[in-house]
Image: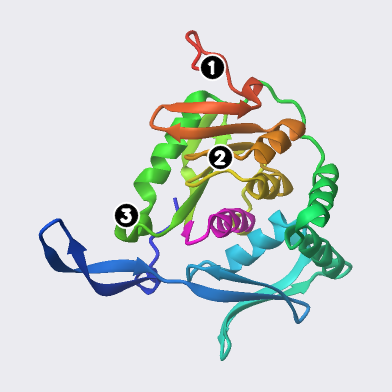
């Protein structure tokens, strides 16, 4: 797991509030997670402004750029720096020599800022550009899904304190089993930000993404599946429901998609062949 964050207090603020009951109004001190804008620039040009939980800014920026298709690996980043300026928190990215990040950034904006029929066309363009994953049947024990979910529930420090964050946890898998001590967990007010933070942190640590399992605290939308696929992550799980478009994309790409994963039960929507069979299978 990640080392203890000595700046965790910066992410939470105390507020005076009141607990309301049928016949009572009781004062108490509650805690809220902070929210701040983060500007990401590429070659000095604004790329995106993300509303996020403070901390892990460089990991968030790297993950955002990778899962959005703006970079294809950390080797395309020549330099990256996080700084606090008068306008707020900024992460500045300088492309490596020969990396054409600006044209890919425009393509990312076309997909994720479009709507209506243009949005449908953009989604079609995105899905057609994502190649299917290679077949690797029996690569994961079902227990790995449950173990990673338990780890996420146990390690969500800011959620326990405030109830106001999402989480994403990325665990390495070997011989179908979770290597729990290598897992990376990040929390943020945004589901997308939490995913991008764990992916970016994996890049910084040199963790291969091809043999990992990603577990999310919220619902599994199309964009979350697309982000994972862009990063090279084929196995996904979530506490909540998927969308129909998310399932459609996962099936087209040959991804494992497990949702409503709570305790030791779950629903498999795509890629059940990725799970190793058990004597009494949990699968239908």
Q: Residue at x 58, y 38 (%)?
A: 242
* Quadrant including the C terminus: top right
Q: Residue at x 70, y 47 (%)?
A: 226
Horizontal side, residue 135 vs residue 207: left or right: right
Q: Which residues are magenta?
A: 187-203
| Residue on which disc 2 sits | 172
Q: Position of residue 178 (x, y in %)?
A: 50, 34
Q: Earlier in the sequence, mark 1 or mark 3?
A: 3
Label 3 vs label 2, nearer the camera: 3
Confirm or deny contact between disc 1 and disc 3 (CB under 8 A).
Answer: no
Q: Earlier in the sequence, mark 2 or mark 1?
A: 2
Q: Image height check: is 191 above or below 281?
A: below
Is residue 195 in the magenta section? Answer: yes
Horizontal side, residue 158 vs residue 249: left or right: left
Label 2 SS: strand
| Residue on which disc 3 sits | 160
Label 3 SS: helix
Q: Image height check: is 200 above or below 240?
A: below
Q: Earlier in the sequence, mark 3 or mark 2?
A: 3
Q: Image height check: is 231 above or below 102?
A: above
Is residue 28 in the magenta section? Answer: no
The quadrant where residue 270 appears: top right
Q: How is the image coloured?
A: rainbow
| Residue on which disc 1 sits | 283
What is the CA distance from the residue labelled 2 to the residue labelled 1? 23 Å
Crowdedness of circle 2 by 10 Å Cα count: few (<14), some, many (20+)?
Answer: many
Q: Residue at x 83, y 70 (%)?
A: 102
């Amino acid at each position: 797991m990640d080392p203890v964050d000595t700046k965790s207090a910066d992410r939470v603020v105390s507020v005076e509030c009141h607990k309301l009951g049928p016949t009572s109004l009781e004062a108490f001190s509650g805690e809220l997670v902070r929210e701040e804008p983060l500007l990401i620039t590429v070659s000095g040009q604004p790329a995106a402004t993300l509303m996020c939980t403070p901390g892990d800014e460089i990991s968030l920026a790297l993950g955002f750029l990778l899962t959005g298709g703006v970079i294809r690996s950390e080797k395309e980043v020549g330099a990256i720096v996080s700084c606090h300026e008068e306008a707020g928190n900024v992460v500045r990215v300088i492309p490596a020599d020969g990396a054409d990040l600006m044209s890919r950034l425009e393509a990312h904006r076309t997909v994720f800022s479009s709507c209506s029929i243009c949005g449908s066309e953009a989604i079609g363009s995105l899905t057609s550009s994502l190649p299917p994953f290679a077949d690797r049947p029996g690569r994961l024990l079902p227990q790995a899904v449950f173990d990673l979910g338990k780890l996420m529930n146990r390690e969500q420090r800011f959620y326990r304190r405030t109830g106001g964050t999402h989480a994403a946890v990325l665990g390495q898998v070997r011989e179908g089993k979770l290597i729990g001590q290598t897992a990376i967990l990040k929390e943020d007010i945004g589901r997308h930000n939490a995913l991008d933070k764990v992916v970016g942190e994996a890049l910084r640590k040199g963790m291969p993404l091809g043999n990992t399992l990603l577990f999310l605290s919220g619902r599994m939308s199309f964009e979350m599946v697309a982000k994972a696929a862009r990063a090279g992550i084929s196995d996904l799980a979530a506490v909540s429901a998927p969308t129909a478009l998310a399932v459609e994309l996962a099936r087209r790409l040959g991804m494992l998609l497990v949702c409503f994963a709570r305790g030791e039960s779950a629903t498999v929507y795509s890629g059940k062949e990725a799970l190793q069979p058990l004597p009494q299978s949990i699968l239908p």
